[in-house]
Image (tube, rainbow, N blue to C red):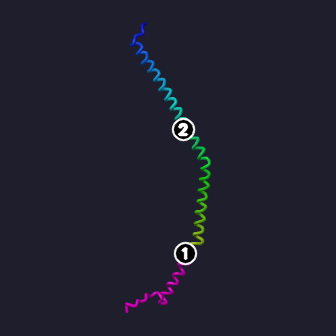
Amino acid sequence: MTLDLETIRDLVIILYGILGLVLMIILVTAALGIWFAIRSVLRHTNKLLSDPIEPTLQEAHKSVQNIRAATEFVSDTAVHPVIRLVSLIRGIRRGISVVAGLGQKRKSDGEE
């Protein structure tokens, strides 16, 4: 068997094709391994971050509900009665001024 130039060329092409396929399989396997590793790391990181944050968020939600309830209580027991009292006093004063004639508009000096 003689090794002429065409035979060497064919062998190099075949060897290059086989090595290219092997390299492609290795690279695809490595890329899939890296992708699964990154997904696993992200999943574990999210679990680690959500563990301490979740109870804190629940406590913050409870605090907001307590503040809302306290605000409604103060509004119902203090603010609304004061508003009603002030409205009543102003209404009485206005009624007295109308009855007493103090509510009439005074004529200006130029309109006589």
Vertical position of residue 27 compared to residue 46: above or below: above
In the rendered image, residue 63, in percent from the top left (x then y), is placed at: 61, 59
Q: In which quarter of the image is the C terminus?
A: bottom left
Question: Main structural element of the magenta stretch: helix, strand or loop?
Answer: helix
Tag on residue 83?
1
Name, please, the residue furthest toward the left: 111
In the rendered image, residue 6, in percent from the top left (x then y), is placed at: 38, 13
Residue at image coords 59%, 60% = 65
Q: Which of marks 2 and 1 is in front?
A: 2
SS category of the residue bearing label 2: helix
Residue 17, picture quadrant: top left
SS category of the residue bearing label 1: helix
Q: Which amino acid, by three-letter code, is at mark 2? A: Arg
Q: Quick check: is 14 in the magenta stretch?
A: no
Tag on residue 104?
none
In the rendered image, residue 18, in percent from the top left (x then y), is placed at: 46, 20
How crowded pointer 1 is (Cα within 10 Å; few <14, some 14-19, many 20+) is rated as few
Compared across the picture, whether 98 is left or right of 41 comes to: left
Q: Mark 2 or mark 1: name the one nearer the start of the chain.
A: 2
Residue at image coords 48%, 23% = 22
Residue 74, picture quadrant: bottom right
Q: Which amino acid, by three-letter code, is at mark 1? A: Ile
In the rendered image, residue 34, in percent from the top left (x then y), is placed at: 53, 34
Closer to us: 29 or 97: 29
Vertical position of residue 17 compared to residue 7: above or below: below
Tag on residue 39?
2
Q: What stretch is highlighted in magenta?
A: 85-112
